[in-house]
Amino acid sequence: MIPFADLKAQYRSIKGEIDAAVAQTLESSQFILGREVAAFEEEFAAFQGAAHCAGTNSGTSAVHLALLAAGVGPGDEVITTPFTFVATVAAILYTGARPVYADIDAETYNIDAAKIAATITPRTKTIMPVHLFGQPADMDPILEIARRHGLTVIEDACQAHAAEYKGRRVGSIGDIGCFSFYPGKNLGAYGEGGCVTTNNPELARTVRLLRNWGEESRYHHVLRGFNYRMEGLQGSILRVKLRHLERWTEAKRRLARVYARELEGAGVRLPREREWARHVYSVYAIASEARDELQRELTAAQIQTAIHYPEPIHAMAPYRDEAFPRGSLPVAERAAGRVLSLPVYAELSEVQAREVASAVKLAAAVQAK
Ligand SMILES: *Cc1c(COP(=O)(O)O)cnc(C)c1O
């Protein structure tokens, strides 16, 4: 069986370093924020090419705090993509603002910058592109629209650690960036975790205050804040894993090249890396008209796959908004019915990737008959 992900294999490959870091943190007993988190923040900021990084207890909290630091609140509108993990939109709603959707680009599944201008109203405050599956959204036209209308840009980079747009790492191309360290992400904690990155010292200061009860000094609260702090153990684990991230990212990119080579002409749509992008393949999504059948065939062949995501947000009952009925965002709706994610992780061998590709080819050929 080829699993969709294998967190145990990754742990075994770095067990010595992880166990030592955990033991040291237990000894220090700095369980909340503390030295390890501060060191991780510095190292991750340098890794992403941002001036500041503030650790949080999840990616969702990071997006929530980024929005609050940008001044987003009730009555505001935030333009984003309907084809994302639910947290992007949930965090907008936490602030009291309203999510407004621009449809996606059919090839990259990212927000289509050309469709943003038509969604701007006097209430628009922020544009929040998502670097979906590990490929950056086309930031230059987004920044240009934002500049013209005086809007902030928040990057949801929760799937895009080490991804690059025109040679720059994501996370501080806009005003503020958000990352998730959920275990299944490209850089995963052993529990929950996230962070905010920015080049703006004021935004960084606000996020640091908000994640820790708005506390400036002990029991002196200058903002209404949250308990969104990163744990010391996660900081120490993330420091160890960050040292391997570049190697893991290159391994994923190698596997993506194997899939691209093997699946050429197989009758499924392959992910397209734009010429200006470094795609980090948080998800390797192919697309097929007969997606469900293809997934069934692969399951029968002992190959686990996943679907990111079976429904765009505006089609989910709890997130319905009459301004965005079914049919109003056709590219996202079509993508949700066709995408299928193949296994892609550093511990997957090229032999296994070829095995996955063969099974996809076989199933697609049978369907074509
Ligand atoms: C994972 C993810 C989040 C939320 O991160 P958590 O750490 O799970 O809270 C937000 N946005 C996107 C695009 C994600 O993939």
Image: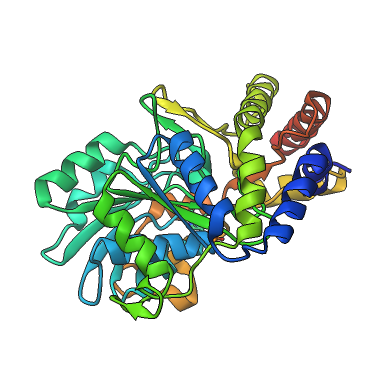
Snapshot quadrant of residue 221:
bottom left
Residue beneath the point at 67% across and 59% down? 28
Is residue 5 visible to us here?
no
| Residue found at the far top of this picture | 261
Where is residue 25? Give x, y as percent.
69, 56
Where is residue 355? Give x, y as percent.
82, 29
Up the image or down, 339 lies above or below 286; here it is below
Where is residue 280? Give x, y as percent.
55, 34
**Residue 310 vs residue 147: left or right?**
right
Residue beneath the point at 39% across and 80% down? 219
**Residue 187 vs residue 138: left or right?**
right
Snapshot quadrant of residue 97:
bottom left
Q: Nearer the viewer, residue 143 or 168?
A: 168
Residue beneath the point at 66% across and 33% down? 244
Where is residue 178? Give x, y as percent.
42, 52
Q: Nearer the viewer, residue 253 or 338?
A: 253
Q: Nearer the viewer, residue 220 or 109?
A: 220
Residue beneath the point at 54% across and 46% down? 40
Number of labelled discs?
0
